[in-house]
Amino acid sequence: EECPAVPPCCFIGFAFGGVSAVTATLTPEGDCYTIAISGRHHAHDSEVTALSFVNCSSAPGEDMPVLFSACCEGKVYFYPHALDPTHNFSLEESVLAFSNYYNCPIFSMASTIIHSQEGKQFSVLCTGDRDGNIRIWLKADNDLMGLCTSTTGQKFRHIQLYKSSTHRGTGYHLVTRAMFLRDNILITGTNNGDVRFWKLGQTGDPSRPIGGRDPLPNLTLRYDLIGIHNGAVELL
């Protein structure tokens, strides 16, 4: 009888464009772990700069995390089976989710969900790039299967653009960190010490079809720490 695959404990993105899954298995003696690369896939043609889990379920309260990766060419891929035990946690069959505008390198990603009036939930992805742009993207399909089989090139719709800093030279304020906290509070940080706190809200109804009043996630700036020090910031 075939042994079930060991679930990954983490994922690693590499400069050559690949992503690997890592497992940690307890030894028979039970006093240490064996760390191993359990899978790898080369989806990108440039350095992998950000990894994120996105909840791709449309059912209220259901959690279906899917691995996403971004690179220096501005492309974002996802791996439908990376966290799926029925597919042995495979990184194969990666799918292009979307490409950033002008192929601008993406350096950070964060995700959350919003809800329609009927209670359906929709995935929202935030990206931060080299030019200081914070972009909000909305998943165009209601479920993971639709996301994988859709023939459209952009499986996420670009909703809005914001700036990571009030400085004019935004090219020197690349967004190195982005993370969502509870109650959809977003924090972004730059390589020049800029930290911004945002509140994610929404207008319209996410259940309406494309071409109507599309869901419109929006960010409201709540607090701005400009250049709190001369260098990049880390967030936790």
Image: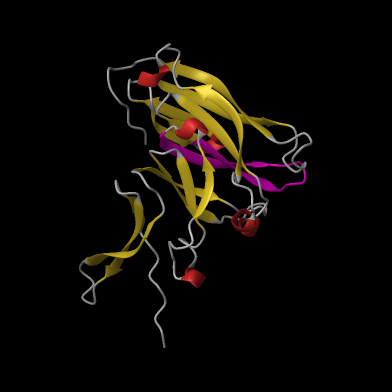
Q: Quadrant of residue 122?
A: top right
Magenta span includes 133: no
> Most prominent secondary structure in the magenta stretch?
strand
Q: Is residue 87 left or right of residue 9?
A: right
Q: Residue 103 location in percent, x, y?
A: 46, 35
Q: Which residue sits at x=71%, y=48%?
A: 120
Which residue is at the front of the view, 184 or 144? 144
Residue appearing at x 53%, y 20% in the figure: 222
Give the position of the N terminus as an image quadrant.
Answer: bottom left
How many marks overall? 0
Q: Is residue 121 magenta?
A: yes
Q: Looking at the picture, tell me which residue is in the foreground, 114 or 29.
A: 114
State the residue lying farthest toward the bottom. 1
Residue numbers of the magenta segment: 105-126
Using the rendered view, name the quadrant where residue 190 is placed: top left
Q: Give the x, y percent position of residue 65.
A: 52, 54
Front-most of residues 145 and 95: 95
Tell me where residue 40 appears, x and y as whole percent.
35, 61
Q: Residue furthest top?
A: 168
Q: Is residue 113 left or right of residue 194?
A: right
Location of residue 114 with respect to 188 vertically, above or below = below
